């Protein structure tokens, strides 16, 4: 089954046109496309794994805080960054022990529990440390209130503003100025 030239057809295809070199294999475009897609997936997967497995900023701050004073500096820097970005900061609250004071009317008294709202944990700690001064400044303000006025929402707002002012005045010059942002009434009885 040799053809007229004396060579087998299978042998001719393997040798190429000149007969002395085998023909080079053509690259399949589909194979190149598959290799490119696989490489892209590997790079994308690596980037996703890096982003998902790296420490979140809160965990990094906790780790820094465990290292000591270096963590405090980084934590303050992060707070400043959040302020620049416009992120809402979580307020801190300091509870006052319940007050019972006589009001302007000698037959009436006020029993109330108040909570101070501050911006930072440092301010909250300072308020706790200065609590005797704060209470001493707040009691005369509460004692000067009119019971009929305290029954109205406007009167309660006025009381909260006066208490915030008295608390800030009591701790002025002690490392935190105007620390009390708001006063919240958590319990109130007038008798």
Image: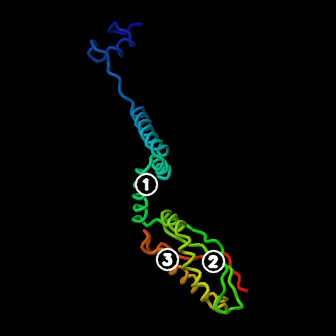
Q: Name the residue at 55% across, 66% down.
A: 128
The percent coordinates of residue 49 (x first, y second) are 48, 42
- Label 2, residues with CA under 10 Å away: few <14, some 14-19, many ≥20: some
**Residue lying furthest right:** 191
Are the two marked residues, 2 and 3, in contact with CB atoms closer than 8 angstroms?
Answer: no
Q: Which mark is residue 125?
A: none
Alpha-carbon span between mark 2 and mark 3: 19 Å
SS for callout 1: helix
The percent coordinates of residue 55 (x first, y second) are 48, 46
Q: Which residue is mark 3?
A: 170
Q: Name the residue at 40% across, 13% down.
A: 10
* Of residues 50 and 110, the one drawn nearer to the viewer in this rendering: 110
Alpha-carbon span between mark 3 and mark 1: 27 Å
**Residue 131 in the image: above or below residue 31:** below
Q: Name the residue at 32% across, 19% down.
A: 23
The quarter of the picture where the C terminus appears is bottom right
- Label 3, residues with CA under 10 Å away: few <14, some 14-19, many ≥20: many
* Of residues 62 and 45, the one drawn nearer to the viewer in this rendering: 62
- Mark 2 against mark 3, which lies toward the viewer? 3
Q: Earlier in the sequence, mark 3 or mark 1?
A: 1
The percent coordinates of residue 187 (x first, y second) are 68, 76
Alpha-carbon span between mark 2 and mark 1: 32 Å
- Mark 3 against mark 1, which lies toward the viewer? 3
Q: What colour scheme governs how the chains and residues are painted in the rendered image of this protein?
A: rainbow
Q: Which mark is residue 185?
A: 2
Q: Which mark is residue 72?
A: 1
């Amino acid at each position: 089954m040799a053809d007229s030239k004396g060579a087998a057809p299978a042998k001719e295809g393997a040798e190429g046109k000149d007969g002395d070199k085998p023909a080079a294999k053509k690259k399949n475009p589909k194979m190149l496309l598959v290799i490119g897609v696989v490489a892209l997936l590997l790079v994308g997967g690596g980037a996703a794994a890096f982003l998902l497995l790296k420490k979140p900023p809160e965990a990094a701050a906790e780790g820094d805080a465990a290292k000591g004073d270096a963590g405090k500096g980084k934590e303050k820097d992060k707070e400043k960054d959040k302020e620049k970005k416009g992120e809402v900061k979580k307020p801190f609250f300091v509870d006052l022990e319940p007050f019972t004071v006589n009001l302007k009317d000698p037959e009436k008294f006020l029993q109330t529990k108040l909570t101070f709202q501050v911006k930072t944990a440092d301010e909250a700690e300072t308020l706790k440390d200065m609590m005797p001064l704060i209470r001493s400044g707040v009691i005369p303000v509460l004692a000067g209130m009119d019971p009929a006025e305290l029954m109205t929402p406007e009167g309660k707002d006025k009381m909260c503003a006066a208490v915030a002012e008295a608390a800030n005045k009591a701790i002025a010059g002690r490392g935190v100025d105007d620390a009390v942002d708001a006063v919240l009434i958590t319990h109130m009885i007038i008798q």
